[in-house]
Image (cartoon, rainbow, N blue to C red):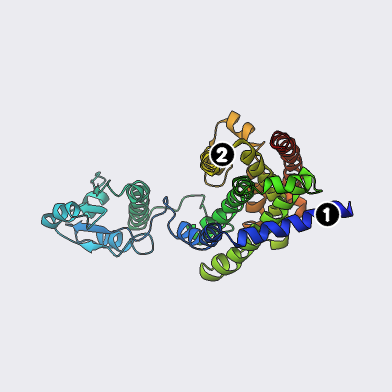
Amino acid sequence: MGRFLANSYRLGTKELWSLWRDPAMLLLIVYVFTLGVYSAATAMPETLSNAPIAIVDEDRSPLSQRIVSAFYPPHFSPPRRIDWAGMDPGMDQGLYTFAMVIPGNFQRDLLAGRSPIIQLNVDATSMNQAFVGSGHVQNIVMGEITEFAQRYRHTTEPPVDLALRARFNPSLDPAWFGALVEVIDYIAMLSIILTGAALIRERERGTVEHLLVMPVTPAEIMLAKIWSMGLVVLLAAWVSITVVVRGVLDVPVAGSLPLFFTGAALCLFATASMGIFMATLARNMPQFAMLLILIIMPLQMLSGGNTPRESMPGPVQDVMLAAPTTHFIQLSQAILFRGAGLDVVWPQCLALLAIGGVLFALSLRRFRNTIAKMA
């Protein structure tokens, strides 16, 4: 056992020096865990931020003034008051994403029991803001109208008052969610890329033949690549959470970071084994890149990080239980968002350990067969 660990340590040190001499990989690691995390966290596509809105107020009543004042940053920019003549040209020039028209006598008709109509014009070329913002505008307007009408008519309050409290993200800031989710995704992605690229690099440079004549086993070679590349990813993730997430973005981390990185290490054991298996299937780096697209995209889309698992079909949920990223995302969100402890996430830890063991055994068998053909 001592010789096994010593050989794995020396081979892993060699992998670290090899990575240090690869500027492209180093640049990828630095970019992903710094600018990649920051840009993804600050530009979540489903959020509404400073959407430009213009209002044609023909009523000039207390109710219309109240509706106008209900739109403010950060979701909307301060409303611009315009007239009918300036609405169409402004939308044609892309100055406003939303243009609302409050007709004359709106407040009088509303209090008289009629059903006045507010017109909302939406620039649908701004697809993300138009899709999300239309619902925001409707909720804001209806909330102001309902509250005004109840108070003016002296109606009794409803018997039940729904008090909403947002847990774990009280301000509903999308950067809190986006930053940590990107770190979680990049941990799995980089571990697959680095371990697979390390093996491909050995083959393209012809150093695999050197390893074959050395007194080392395929298991030692695999373990060396896993621990060395996993260590790099863990260090990069720690720097990203400390500097970018908690420092620059000011995102709080609720749970224990040591527990999170323990779960990350278990995930890296599984995903790094997956990277080696993929590298044994590919003959060169372009083929490995094609395999990455086929594997990483479904892992990121179907593991529950960007889309809740509950919204996926049942068979898809069942199949993705075999993916280590599914359990890692559940573990990470429980720890980082909700402050969960080991008593909550131990099932995910066991699942990651079991999946990692199976993937390591499959990769080791495939790696031995590949080496046997080269010998």
- Residue 138 against residue 310 in the figure, above or below: below
* Residue 339 visible in image: no
Q: Secondary structure at mark 1?
A: helix
Q: Which mark is residue 295?
A: 2
Give the amino acid type for the residue marked by disc 1 in the picture: Leu
Instruction: Tell me the crowding category of disc 1: few under 14, some 14 to 19, or many 20 or more residues within 10 angstroms, Cα based.
Output: few
- Left or right of 261? Residue 305 is left
Dot placed on the residue nearer the N-terminal end, 2 or 1:
1
Q: Nearer the viewer, mark 2 or mark 1?
A: 1
Residue at 56% x, 39% y is 295
Please, is residue 369 above or below residue 324 in the view? above
Horizontal side of residue 187 vs 350, given as left or right: left
Secondary structure beneath disc 2?
helix
Of 36 and 151, the residue lying toward us? 36
Q: Check if mark 2's residue and mark 1's residue have beta carbons within 8 Å.
A: no
Answer above or below: position of 205 versus 360. below
Residue at 70 percent of width and 33 percent of height: 373
Q: Which residue position is annotated with label 1? A: 5
* Residue type at numbered disc 2: Ile
Q: Position of residue 130 (x, y in %)?
A: 32, 48
Residue 307, how many percent across, how many down? 52, 43
User: Which of 340 and 148 lies nearest the eye of the viewer?
Assistant: 340
Residue at image coords 28%, 59%: 52
Which residue is outermost to the left? 85
Q: Is residue 38 left or right of residue 196?
A: left
